[in-house]
Amino acid sequence: MNIQTKAVHSGDRKQPQKQIPVATPVHFAASWVCSDQAEQDRIFAAEEKGFAYSRYHNPTNEALEELITSLENGAGALACASGMAALQHSLMAALLDRRRKVLCARDVYGATIKLLMDVLGPFGVETTFVDTGDLAAVERAMEEEKPGVLLLETISNPLLRVSDLPALAALCRKQGTALVVDNTFASPLLVRPLEMGAHIVVHSSTKYLGGHGDTLGGLIVSDEEHLEAVRRLSRIVGPVMGPMECFLTMRGIKTFPLRVERQCRNAQGLAAWLRQQPGVERVYYPDDPQHPDAEVVSRLLPDGLFGGMVSFELKNAQSKEGAFEFLDRLKLIVKATSLGDVHTMVLYPWISSHRDVSPKQKQRMGIRENLIRLSVGIEALDDLVADVAQALA
Ligand SMILES: *Cc1c(COP(=O)(O)O)cnc(C)c1O
């Protein structure tokens, strides 16, 4: 079945009742009553599938988990309270019986670096960073570090590098390293990392999957090998998404293929227009034939779908003050720190996502003081162009 069809059908209308509600109800119950003690005994022993307590299983959560499992072609899923909770949980599940070492892509989400250094670090997890665009460097680091996990993002933030997932997965499988992929920026419409050899996929569903800027959430989709650990640890810790958020996320997902297609088209149009502007020094968008990963892009991304993120450097505003002036002139585009919503959003990495990165490190990463990141929405392209044009003028 195609992803557009799965997005609206998977997970819903599952109840074995005669009259089936068209949408999955929001089950707020914390616990369930069994018909007799023997049944409860079988459920606690996991001999029978059923509901006992919402930290273990909840029908609304289960519907969303079935939906995302189907979209990513995984073995099973866990819906978590946030993208960060999902990342932490998946790393713990993957490291459970592996060396407590993480090899992490250099250009990941800022909080992901903090999770590794400030949360998992004190518990004995060592992290080294590598440029995942350089396969030889990854191979060397894998041999030296023998990491338990390789962690990376399908499309990186904010310079939109695209990782060669099949090649990296092959390296991981040779070494027994688990490949954990944050697929937030690509969404399963563009890339499904489990099909390319990844072990665990994580989403901040707050972004493209939820899509409306109204629901925080994270999703873990696992292969068969790691699913037991993901579910077993969650039974104990309970980093789970609330049922109302599961309902909202599921409602969002039904239209995500439509939204993301439109966002990709708008982003490509805006990137093309930006390249023509004298006030713009450089545009970062994966459809560029000069893109450093152009060959990987042509293999991994579907025809004409290069993602909804566009970054660019201002020519006449090399300083923070100049960038502020440009940003303050924007009227329609929303100045907020998220992405993937139906409305277009702008973010200034220098003071937000990369604020705590040292100037030297920023220079090495290519994050300049005139760099602007756009998450393109579903508006009419003309209106977006007009807003950026008046702010550039
Ligand atoms: C937002 C984001 C996260 C964190 O997700 P939350 O839902 O905010 O916890 C992780 N990775 C990426 C790539 C993100 O954009």
Image: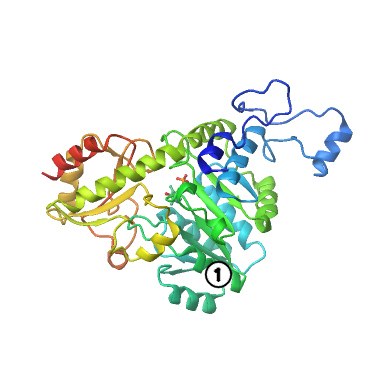
Query: Does residue 162 appear in this view?
Result: no
The quadrant in which the N terminus is found is: top right
- Determine the residue positioned at 40% across, 68% down: 133
Q: Can you give x and y, in whole percent of width and height, for residue 71 in the image?
A: 55, 45
The answer to whether 19 is drawn above or below residue 199 in the figure is above
The answer to whether 377 is drawn above or below residue 355 in the figure is above
In the image: residue 156, left or right of residue 26: left
Q: Quadrant of residue 238?
A: top right
Q: Can you give x and y, in whole percent of width and height, for residue 356 in the image?
A: 34, 57
In the image: residue 347, left or right of residue 28: left
* Number of other residues with Cα within 10 Å of mark 1, as a class: few under 14, some 14 to 19, many 20 or more: some
- Name the residue nearer the viewer: 211 or 193: 193
- Name the residue nearer the viewer: 192 or 360: 192
Residue where numbered disc 1 is placed: 170
Q: Quadrant of residue 332?
A: top left
- Determine the residue positioned at 40% across, 38% down: 259
Colour scheme of the picture: rainbow
Query: Does residue 27 appear in this view?
Result: yes
Q: Can you give x and y, in whole percent of width and height, for residue 73 in the image?
A: 59, 50
Q: Amino acid at mark 1?
A: Ala
The quadrant in which the C terminus is found is: top left
Q: Can you give x and y, in whole percent of width and height, for residue 292 in the image?
A: 33, 66
Q: Which residue occupies the extreme top position in the image?
A: 19
